[in-house]
Image (tube, rainbow, N blue to C red):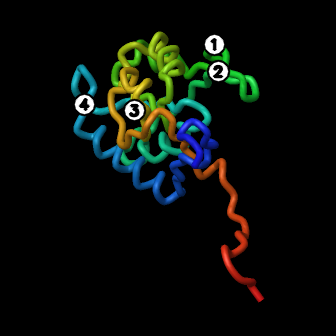
Amino acid sequence: MPEMTDRLPHEKGFHVSWDQLHRDSRALAWRLQSHKPEGGGEWRAVVAITRGGMAPAMIVARELNVRIVDTISVKSYNHQEQSEPKVIKFPDMDVMGDGEGVLIIDDLVDTGRTLEVVRKHLPKAHVATVYAKPMGRPQVDSFITEVSQDTWIFFPWDMALQYVKPFHGTND
């Protein structure tokens, strides 16, 4: 029997369907509805962290009736090699200001390094992710589901439907 550390990423995987992502993103919106910006009032803007945060951000913005939606793009991987995170596309900072009343949305916080960089530019924003791993949790204000640090999350945009051969017998 292989040791836990001998597992391939897909062997300790958490598969997320489009339906599940939609339900979890709506749950995140419901949770955020009860959190109001520091100065009170309603959320005034949503910033999606590209690319994974775009689908959840769209759902959250729709549910909370937020019309100003922008993106921030942080590059921390070069192919599969991790490097120092760097913002390569900013939202309209004249609109975002210091982040007060702004929701930053991402699909997942893993180590928290990406969110740490984003928080430097929007320090008063509320950071929310759909899924969270323990190392990154300190960088997140709200999330829905926590998974272990060694769990690999398979998002629907990374998956394709294909035929799978039966375990036993033929398909004649």
Relative to the observer, which residue lies in front, 15 or 54?
15
Tag 3: amino acid: Ala
How far apart in space, not on screen, are marks 1 and 2 (Cα)?
A: 6 Å
**C-alpha separation, residue under disc 4 versus residue under disc 3:** 13 Å
Q: Of circles 1 and 3, which is in front?
A: 1
Residue position marked by numbered label 3 in the rendering: 128
Q: Which residue is mark 4?
A: 36
Say which residue label 2 marks: 76
| Quarter occupied by residue 50 | top right
At numbered mark 4, what does the secondary structure look like: helix, strand or loop? loop
> Of helix, strand and loop, which one carries label 2?
strand
Number of dots carrying numbers: 4
Marks 1 and 4: in contact by CB < 8 Å? Answer: no
Q: Amino acid at mark 2?
A: Ser
* Three-letter residue code for mark 4: Lys
Q: What distance separates the C-alpha of mark 1 from that of mark 3?
A: 22 Å
Q: Earlier along the polypeptide chain: callout 2 or callout 4?
A: 4
For badge 1, the amino acid type reads Glu
At horizontal 74% and vertical 23% (from top left) the residue drawn is: 78
For disc 3, the neighbor class at 10 Å (few under 14, some 14 to 19, many from 20) is: many
Q: Estimate the x, y position of residue 88 in percent, counting from the top left.
A: 66, 18
Residue picked out by circle 1: 84
Say above or below: 19 vs 31. Answer: below
Q: CA distance from mark 2 to mark 4?
A: 31 Å
In front of the other: 58 or 31? 31
Q: Kindly check if marks 4 and 3 are in contact, taking CB atoms under 8 A apart as contact.
A: no
Mark 2 nearby-residue class (10 Å; few <14, some 14–19, many ≥20): some
